[in-house]
Amino acid sequence: MKKQKVSSAVIRRLPRYFRHLNDLLQTGTVRISSSALGKSMGLTASQIRQDLSCFGEFGQQGYGYNVEKLQGEIAEILGMNRNHNAVILGAGNLGRALIENFHFEKNGFVLSAAFDVAPSIVGTQIGGVVIRDTAQLENYLAEYPASVGVLTVPGKVAGIMAERLVACGVRGIWNFTNMELELKEDNIVIENVHFADSLLALSYMISDTE
Amino acid sequence: MKKQKVSSAVIRRLPRYFRHLNDLLQTGTVRISSSALGKSMGLTASQIRQDLSCFGEFGQQGYGYNVEKLQGEIAEILGMNRNHNAVILGAGNLGRALIENFHFEKNGFVLSAAFDVAPSIVGTQIGGVVIRDTAQLENYLAEYPASVGVLTVPGKVAGIMAERLVACGVRGIWNFTNMELELKEDNIVIENVHFADSLLALSYMISDTE
């Protein structure tokens, strides 16, 4: 599918569409109008039609959307059928939480390996994943390439570890370190997870109701 | 300060303004134009002026913004000076990661307590915070009220725990459980953290460059 230039706001909504369609599928909904889908997501019908028009023609006048078909199309657009490999760097509390509880496979990813520097955990398993020595990162990725590196290392080594991942061919970094990464290569996708942004939005909303 | 109705998109950008202004302060920047601030944040100058105009008059024609002053104003708008109390429910990997590594106090919150049901960790300390028995939640909050509850419990008890928090006077829930919370009270602010949305946006962006 040839994609036009899509705004960041639309990209951010795509995973929400996917989630909502998934919920609809699980409750047995076969089709849905753009206005009903919008209502459940806090969007207008025209915004939904406009968002989806970036990627092609999905709905049908007078029928709405076929939920299963639209979910499949959005999964395809999101690249969920490509079996991207991911590796995690840093098996501290947050790394462990992701390894044990985050469903990489439900999101189209294969968590292929996890790395840490602590001798006490290298060689142990977390949720069936062996923790490897970070010193072996380059050897491992040479043999088993990965598209995405998940950074759950301490902030002070975030930049160095990101560069090592990129040198090994990783094209996207899921960055939980709270550090701004400035990489030498400029075609690397960095997705920052800033917990603080989320808590501060909550702070605003509860302060607003006081 | 009397606030007008502010769009969700603007609310989401406020913490980013705060972060960027913080970075500027730390590099010793005293003032900045809306276009320079916009450039560093990937926004246009007019978008920045429009965002900030929701809250009052901050910049000065020909001068721009005083970085320290604007940061202080945004902190105030975000409710960062109110010392909101927060409690964490669930001291598993993710709960531990937040207790040990997340800077609640830098975001204007006091993490006053953490709760879990596991006898093996109740009574232990994580990062100086005592893990209390979830059975004591109501007694504790009656004595030490909190504005925000952080939910890092298993999804299957998310709804029950959210209701218990709300019954104790909590007004905002920072929800990491990946479950949609449907509460009886309708004036409770729920802030969902969906890791999958972030990974799927990354997935889209790396798939797009293939």
Image (tube, coloured by chain):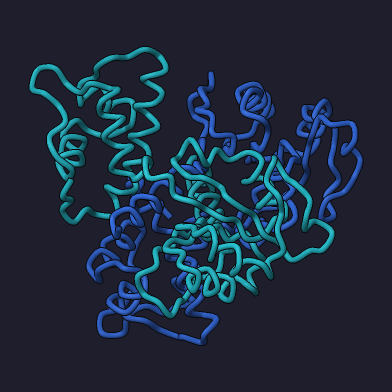
Chain colours: A cyan, B blue
Q: Residue at x 56, y 53 (%)?
A: A195
Q: Residue furthest front?
A: A143
User: Would you place residue B188 above or below residue B63 in this image?
Assistant: above
Is the N terminus of chain A in the top left, top right, bottom left or bottom right quadrant?
Answer: top left
Q: Position of residue B5 (x, y in %)?
A: 33, 45
Q: Position of residue A149 (x, y in %)?
A: 52, 59
Q: Residue at x 51, y 87 (%)?
A: B28
User: Would you place residue A48 above or below residue A24 in this image?
Assistant: below
User: Would you place residue A35 above or below residue A198 in this image?
Assistant: above
Q: Indicate left or right for A195 with B204 as reference.
A: right
User: Would you place residue B147 above or below residue A150 in this image?
Assistant: above
Q: Residue at x 57, y 37 (%)?
A: B175
Q: Residue at x 29, y 26 (%)?
A: A39
Task: Tally the numbered discs.
Answer: 0
Q: Can the viewer see residue B103 in this picture?
A: no
Q: Indicate left or right for A107 with B157 as reference.
A: left
Q: Can the viewer see residue B22 in this picture?
A: yes
- The front one of B107 and B147 is B107
